[in-house]
Amino acid sequence: MDALPERSRPVQRDLDAAGVETSIRVLPDSARTAQEAASAIGCEVAAIANSLVFVADGSPVLVMTSGGHRADVEVLAREIGANAVSMAPASVVREATGQAIGGVAPVGHPAPLRTYLDESLAAHEEIWAAAGHPHTVVPLTFEALQRLTRGTVIQVA
């Protein structure tokens, strides 16, 4: 674990604590976008699980979306029962997750975030999520992601 960037270590600890048998991979180049990550990994962009922080009725929530489409804030609001949903500014993302945009992991945050999972991610045998740093990713199954985050499966687009 010492070879991992500092912000990826809490992610690996949470993976280990949850009994998820996987390892964080360090990429030679940044994978800040779904397309960059898919190219670096060699998978289709829809198998990238983007970790997006939104503000729903004033509180940050984490939405794991497929890189194959964009999340629709109106659909998100309806699905999670919120009056207003908007993308969180970078400062809120950092405060809520301890991680920077482009490297936000599904776990490893200072405190658990209410999490929602894009139903379309379930179609992939293996999905890839950022692991706390723009140069780190972690392979997961949809079931492991759901168990790890205790996320609610919703439609996002």
Image (spheres, rainbow, N blue to C red):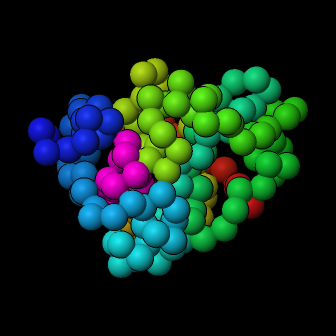
The reply to whether the magenta stretch includes residue 28 is: no
Farthest residue to the front: give it. 29
Q: Residue at x 44, y 36 (%)?
A: 99
**Number of residue marks:** 0
Residue 30 percent coordinates (x, y): 39, 60
**Quadrant location of the C terminus?**
bottom right
**Is any part of residue 149 visible from this angle?**
no
- In the image, residue 147 lies at what x, y percent? 40, 41
Q: Residue at x 59, y 56 (%)?
A: 65
Q: Which residues are magenta?
A: 129-139
Q: Split into 4 quadrants, where in the image is the N terminus?
A: top left
Q: Is residue 30 above or below residue 146?
A: below
Image coordinates for residue 97, horizontal then vertical, percent: 48, 31
* Residue 120 visible to the viewer: yes
Q: Is residue 137 left or right of residue 94?
A: left
Q: Residue at x 28, y 62 (%)?
A: 27
Who is closer to the viewer here, 137 or 112?
137
Residue 11 position in % (x across, y down): 31, 38
Question: On screen, 104 above or below 121?
Answer: above
Question: Seen in the image, is 88 located left or right of residue 107?
Answer: right
Q: Residue at point 20% right, 44% down?
A: 4
